[in-house]
């Protein structure tokens, strides 16, 4: 299972864990360490509250049944203005990702559309996107479907290799890490007795 979990800040430029987006990122990181148990990370040492000092954390684990889990957690002001460093990092991760989370402000759709226009995808790679911001159902357009249709000859409408999870109501920053963990836990439990 390969996951990319992106967290946007509540306030652009915030540096304190008092920011709801930074706090959500910190909570997710702690929950990932607890969920995976014996895990290696990059960087090797992660502070209790990583925040802006450690905005890119990779988790690598092999479960008891031999399944491999890799999760990359990224913290940005927002995906719309994150810049070239984020774009290159996301492009390198997006192709192999089984699931991509965006947790943060929808930005009246601007952040949702910005993320949909980023990344590089691999033919035949099935992916789930979870756009976890306020009212994201209203903001998701066809861009991700079109990107996947363009590289998959057997899927001219782009729905065979992509599923989208959205919100139709507000999404609170305090619930974002828990919603993301619920998705990961559900996928990890698939096929288990």
Image: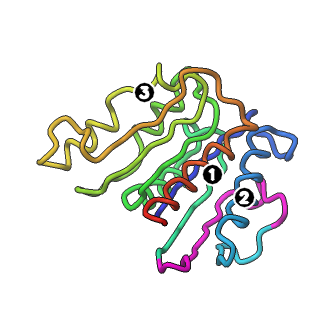
Res 21 quadrant in image: top right
Neighbour class for label 3 at 10 Å: few (<14), some, many (≥20)? Answer: some
Provide the secondary structure element on which disc 3 rests.
loop
Helix, strand or loop at mark 2: helix
The disc at residue 31 is 2
Rendered view: 161 above or below 61: above
Q: Is residue 14 visible?
A: yes
Residue drawn at 42 percent across, 27 percent down? 140
Which of pointers 3 and 2 indicates the residue nearer the eye?
2
Q: CA distance from mark 3 to mark 2?
A: 28 Å
User: In the image as oriented, which residue stretches furthest toward the left?
Assistant: 153
Q: Is residue 118 left or right of residue 111?
A: left
Q: Is residue 64 magenta?
A: yes
Residue lying at 82% horizontally and 66% vertically, measured from the top left:
47
- Tell me the magenta residue range: 47-66
Does 82 sit left or right of 190 as displayed?
right
Q: Are the residues at dot 3 and dot 2 in contact (C-beta closer than 8 Å)?
A: no
- Which residue is identified by label 1? 181
Circle 1 SS class: helix
Pinpoint residue 165: horizontal percent, then vertical percent.
Answer: 46, 36
Mark nearer the N terminus (3 vs 2)? 2
Residue 60, percent from left and from top:
57, 74
Q: Which mark is residue 140?
A: 3
């Amino acid at each position: 299972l390969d996951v990319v979990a992106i967290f946007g800040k509540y306030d652009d430029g915030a540096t304190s864990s008092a920011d709801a987006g930074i706090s959500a990122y910190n909570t997710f990181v702690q929950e990932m360490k607890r969920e995976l148990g014996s895990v290696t990370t990059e960087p090797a040492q992660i502070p209790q509250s990583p925040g802006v000092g450690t905005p890119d954390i990779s988790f690598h684990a092999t479960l008891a049944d031999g399944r491999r889990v890799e999760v990359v957690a990224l913290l940005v002001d927002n995906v719309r203005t994150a810049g070239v460093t984020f774009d290159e990092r996301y492009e390198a991760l997006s192709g192999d990702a089984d699931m991509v989370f965006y947790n943060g402000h929808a930005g009246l759709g601007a952040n949702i559309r910005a993320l949909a226009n980023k990344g590089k995808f691999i033919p035949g790679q099935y992916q789930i996107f979870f756009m976890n911001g306020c009212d994201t159902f209203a903001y998701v357009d066809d861009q991700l479907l079109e990107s996947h249709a363009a590289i998959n000859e057997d899927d001219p409408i782009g729905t065979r290799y992509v599923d989208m999870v959205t919100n139709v109501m507000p999404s609170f920053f305090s619930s974002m890490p828990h919603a993301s963990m619920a998705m990961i836990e559900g996928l990890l439990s698939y096929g288990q007795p």
